[in-house]
Amino acid sequence: MRLPILLLMLGALAASAQTRWTEDAANQWYAKQPWLVGANYTPASAINQLEMWQADTFDIAQIDRELGWARAIGMNTMRVFLHDLLWQQDAAGAAKTRRNVPESGKSAPDQTHFRAV
């Protein structure tokens, strides 16, 4: 049983090594990317990163409005923090609200980065 798993792992490793970009390809891709302008984001109605995501205080309309303001002044990326206590309290609810943010509308910046704390 161990041998097939080992062979599968070696095959996956070999495949990933073959698809790695060259330094030149990586530099060409990077040169096409826009300059990132953004900020860490917590809505004005939330006192901290945890309150932003809790069911009682999650407000997608306000988040969409504020991310629209960010886009209007030229921001193209936002970092949103995901607190581990939220996952401990309500993992299913946290996943549901987290999925709403990038889909919250065309007014949001081009990129939303989620960072666990």
Image (tube, rainbow, N blue to C red):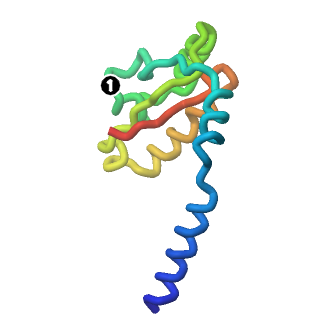
Q: Is residue 108 visible?
A: no
Q: Is residue 102 left or right of residue 2?
A: right
Q: As shown in the figure, which amino acid type bears the numbered disc 1?
A: Asn
As drawn, 52 above or below 87: above
Q: Position of residue 104 (x, y in %)?
A: 62, 29
Q: Position of residue 79 (x, y in %)?
A: 46, 28
Per the image, label 1 sits on a secondary structure element best described as loop
For the C terminus, which image quadrant? top left
Task: Report the label total.
Answer: 1
In the displayed image of the protein, which residue is found farthest to the top? 73
Residue at (56%, 19%) from the top-left corner? 67
Residue at (63%, 22%) from the top-left corner? 34
In the displayed image of the protein, which residue is found farthest to the bottom? 1
As drawn, 42 above or below 100: above
Residue at (57%, 62%) from the top-left corner? 16
Q: Is residue 32 visible?
A: yes
Q: Is residue 25 left or right of residue 95?
A: right
**Label 1: few (<14), some or many (≥20) within 10 Å?**
few
Q: Position of residue 58 (x, y in %)?
A: 46, 30
Residue at (64%, 27%) from the top-left corner? 31
Q: Tell me the quarter of the picture where residue 69 sits.
A: top right
- Residues 89 and 104: in front is 104
Q: Tell me the quarter of the picture where residue 82 sits.
A: top left
Q: Is residue 105 left or right of residue 2?
A: right
As drawn, 31 above or below 115: above
Q: Position of residue 99 (x, y in %)?
A: 56, 41
Residue at mark 1: 48
- Residues 16 and 102: in front is 16
